[in-house]
Image (cartoon, rainbow, N blue to C red):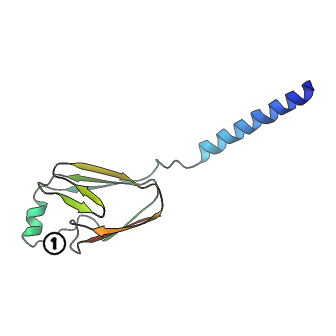
């Protein structure tokens, strides 16, 4: 009986070590690239004057774990897909699942953006 308990204890200890090793080797959802978009002061005035403003691509491709950071230094609110950033505000969106987000973009001449998360 004691021998069975020792064997079971050894097996459980080995399983715990293996589980810990797997968790350490598993990629962290927090790891990723940070894409920073700075909206300079005067951007809305440039758009209103008819100047083409393109601060990010029409199709933005990111990976799970990546973040989109929008720093709005303008005096107007701007929108990138579902994300709305007020004047002098900062927004950070970390992407946690694959998919596609389509929406309005005030920072691209087309007025649209597609964010594809792989």
At horizontal 6% and vertical 70% (from top left) the residue drawn is 49
Please indicate whether residue 101 sits to the left or right of residue 26 in the image.
left
Question: Would you place residue 33 above or below residue 116 in this image?
Answer: above
Q: Residue at x 55, y 49 (%)?
A: 27
Q: Position of residue 60 (x, y in %)?
A: 35, 66
Q: Circle 1 — which element?
A: loop
Q: In this figure, which residue is indicated by the disc labeled 1? A: 52
Judge left or right: residue 29 versus residue 39.
Answer: right
Residue 115 image offset from top left, x and y in percent: 37, 66
Whether residue 65 is situated above or below residue 18 in the rendered picture: below
Residue drawn at (23%, 75%) of the image: 110
Query: Foreground residue, 110 or 52?
Result: 110
Figure quadrant of the N terminus? top right
Q: Image quarter for residue 82?
A: bottom left
Q: Horizontal placement of 54 versus 68: left or right?
A: left
Above or below: residue 36 compared with residue 11: below
Residue drawn at the location 61% of the way across and 46% of the way down: 25
Q: Position of residue 18 (x, y in %)?
A: 71, 41
């Amino acid at each position: 009986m004691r021998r069975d308990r020792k064997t079971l204890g050894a097996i459980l200890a080995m399983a715990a070590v293996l589980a810990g090793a797997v968790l350490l080797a598993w990629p962290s959802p927090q790891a990723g690239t940070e894409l920073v978009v700075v909206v300079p002061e005067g951007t809305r005035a440039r758009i209103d004057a008819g100047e083409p403003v393109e601060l990010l691509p029409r199709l933005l491709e990111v990976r799970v774990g990546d973040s989109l950071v929008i720093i709005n230094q303008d005096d107007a609110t701007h929108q990138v897909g579902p994300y709305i950033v007020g004047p002098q505000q900062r927004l950070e969106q970390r992407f946690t699942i694959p998919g596609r987000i389509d929406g309005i973009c005030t920072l691209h001449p087309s007025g649209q953006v597609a964010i594809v998360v792989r």
